[in-house]
Amino acid sequence: KIIEHSENDPDYRITVDLEAQRVWDENEEIVADFNMEPFRRHCMLNGLDDIGLTLEDEDDITSYERERSEHGGVVPA
């Protein structure tokens, strides 16, 4: 129905709520729930690309690099 409405009305608008995993149109005539993989949802909600996702672990990466340089490139077990 969403596609049909959008083809017939160039001003047709829908809202997508990623947190609630719900889609609706401006008249709330069409309301639909959807499922999204939690990892993808987290990335979209937080605006994370591959670099942003890596930077979430920046403190752990910095700690690892510090330990590695302190031990001549070998991290003790």
Image: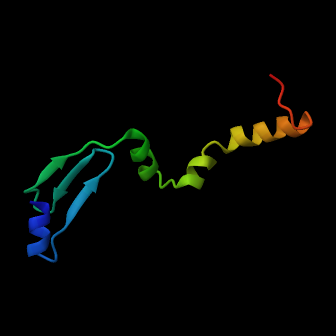
Residue found 51% across the figure and 53% down from its top: 48
Q: Which residue is most to the front?
A: 74
Q: Quadrant of residue 14?
A: bottom left
Q: Is 74 on the left or on the right of 35, as rendered? A: right
Residue found 70% across the figure and 38% down from its top: 60
Q: Which corner quadrant holds the C terminus?
A: top right
Residue found 8% across the figure and 60% down from its top: 1
Q: Which residue is most to the top?
A: 77
In the rendered view, tell whether residue 13 sits above or below residue 46: below
Q: Nearer the viewer, residue 70 or 29?
A: 70
Q: Is 72 on the left or on the right of 44, as rendered? A: right
Q: Position of residue 18 (x, y in %)?
A: 32, 49
By what rule are the colours in the image chosen? rainbow
Q: Nearer the viewer, residue 66 or 75?
A: 75
Residue found 83% across the figure and 30% down from its top: 75
Q: How many marks?
A: 0
Q: Position of residue 52 (x, y in %)?
A: 57, 53
Q: Which residue is most to the bottom?
A: 10
Q: Is 30 on the left or on the right of 61, as rendered? A: left
Q: Position of residue 2 (x, y in %)?
A: 13, 61
Q: Quadrant of residue 25?
A: bottom left
Q: Position of residue 34 (x, y in %)?
A: 23, 45
